[in-house]
Image (tube, helix red, strand yellow):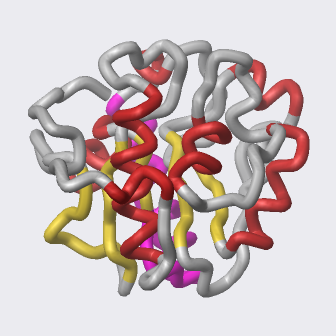
Amino acid sequence: MSEGLEDILAERLAVIFCGINPGLLAAAQGHHFAGRGNRFWRTLHLAGFTAHQVLPEDDRTLLQYHCGLTTVVERPTARADQLSRDEFKAAANGFEHKIRRYAPRHVAFLGKAGYCALSGLREVAWGLQPQTLGDAAVWVLPNPSGRNLAFTLEQLVQAYGQLYLAAFPGSRAACARSDSGMLGGSNDST
């Protein structure tokens, strides 16, 4: 559980989405991705994960779709760059234990910062990673924050749709009908 922001987890989910840390508004309201400009819930719906766009106050309904939510670091901040490297190091063992305990099929880090800090890798590509966490496939997806202007909604939906198709084989995500690559570029932004 995060400070003021409860994890939404169950055993053996298809996907656990891992935010870097709670935003101040999310922590104050007690709901993940509660900021008005955050595109997480819209992206999730358009990528096929949910039947309708879930509202932040209904975040627990994500379990009905075999998905969960957690954060790498528990401390709420206005911006993720306010976290120290030491905070990521301190969070690593507890985070890894949590993922092993709940045993999802896929873990999706929302932004490169959290995964790089936990894995010790300096650079990672977007999408499916060669490493696993426990038995879970690891994905790195663009951060849906409204502050992340490097990715359009369409690019977010395409990236998250790739995970959707891997997590739910045989399903059709609205975004995955494209023949293009995951993001069609080499954007290195969070």
- In the rendered image, which quarter is residue 14 located in? bottom right
Q: Residue at x 35, y 48 (%)?
A: 159
The residue lying toward the viewer, choosing from 99 and 149, is 149
Q: Looking at the figure, which quarter contains the C terminus?
A: top left
> What residue lies at 49% left-to-right and 55% top-to-bottom?
174
| Residue range of the region highlighted in magenta in the rendering | 85-107
Q: Position of residue 183 (x, y in %)?
A: 22, 40
**Residue 146 covered by magenta stretch:** no
Q: Is residue 79 above or below residue 139?
A: above
Percent coordinates x, y for residue 71 in the rendering? 57, 47
Count of numbered circles in the view: 0
The reply to whether residue 164 is visible in this rendering is: yes
Give the answer, above or below, for where 62 lies relative to 38.
Answer: below
| Residue displayed at 64% across by 67% down | 67
**Which corner quadrant holds the N terminus?**
bottom right
Q: Give me the residue at 53% from left, 43% from top.
A: 19
Q: Is residue 107 left or right of residue 26?
A: left
Hey, which quadrant is residue 31 in on the image? top right
Q: Is residue 57 above or below residue 93?
A: above
**Image spot of residue 167 (x, y percent):** 45, 76
Q: Which of the pair 120/56 is nearer the observer?
A: 56
